[in-house]
Amino acid sequence: MLRESLHSKIHRATVTAALPDYVGSITIDATLLDRCGMRVNDKVLISNCRNGERLETYIFRGEPGSGKIELNGAAAHCVEPGDQVIIMHFALMTEAEYASHHPTVLLVDGKNRVTEVMHYHPS
């Protein structure tokens, strides 16, 4: 049986832009994607720390080192620049995969630079 479990997370990233007229997605600095294992077109769940809104979308790759966290299309109406968001990526895993997987969690500063990398353990 496959179960959906946390793969990786970017914790309290700062929204740099909300672009409602852009094709829908979230643009994330490629440096962050590479550090946590998220990929272009992966589905993510985004939680806005200011208003509690949650939404799902897919990832676009932003320029490395840009600090970009941009919500595009309809999702842009759920955030404002400066909001802090939690970006969560999930994956389908077997019991064996789950037992050996340790989700990567990036803690970032106000400019979306990694300050700490954590790994959750299933036990």
Image (cartoon, helix red, strand yellow):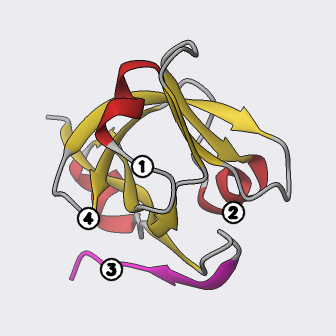
State if disc 4 and disc 1 touch (CB < 8 Å): yes
Locate the C terminus and report the quarter of the image it occupies. Answer: bottom left
Disc 1 residue type?
Answer: Glu
Which one is nearer the viewer's eye here, 68 or 79? 79
Disc 2/disc 4 C-alpha distance (Å): 25 Å
Q: Which label sits on residue 35?
A: 2
Residue nearest the observer in this picture, 120 or 77 = 77
Residue 80 circle label: 1
Task: Pick whichever of labels 2 and 4 is earlier in the sequence.
Answer: 2
- The residue lying toward the viewer, choosing from 112 and 104, is 112
Query: What's the mark number on residue 50?
Result: 4
Give the mark, 3 or 2, whose residue is nearer the N terminus: 2
Give the x, y percent position of residue 95.
22, 52
Q: Secondary structure at mark 4?
A: loop
Q: Is residue 29 above or below residue 86?
A: above
- How far is the residue under mark 1 from the one under mark 4? 9 Å
Residue kind at label 2, given as amino acid type: Arg
Position of 29 with respect to 38 (left or right) is: right
Measure how far apart labels 3 and 2 are at the Cα level. Answer: 18 Å
- Residue range (magenta): 114-123
Which element carries disc 2, helix, strand or loop?
helix
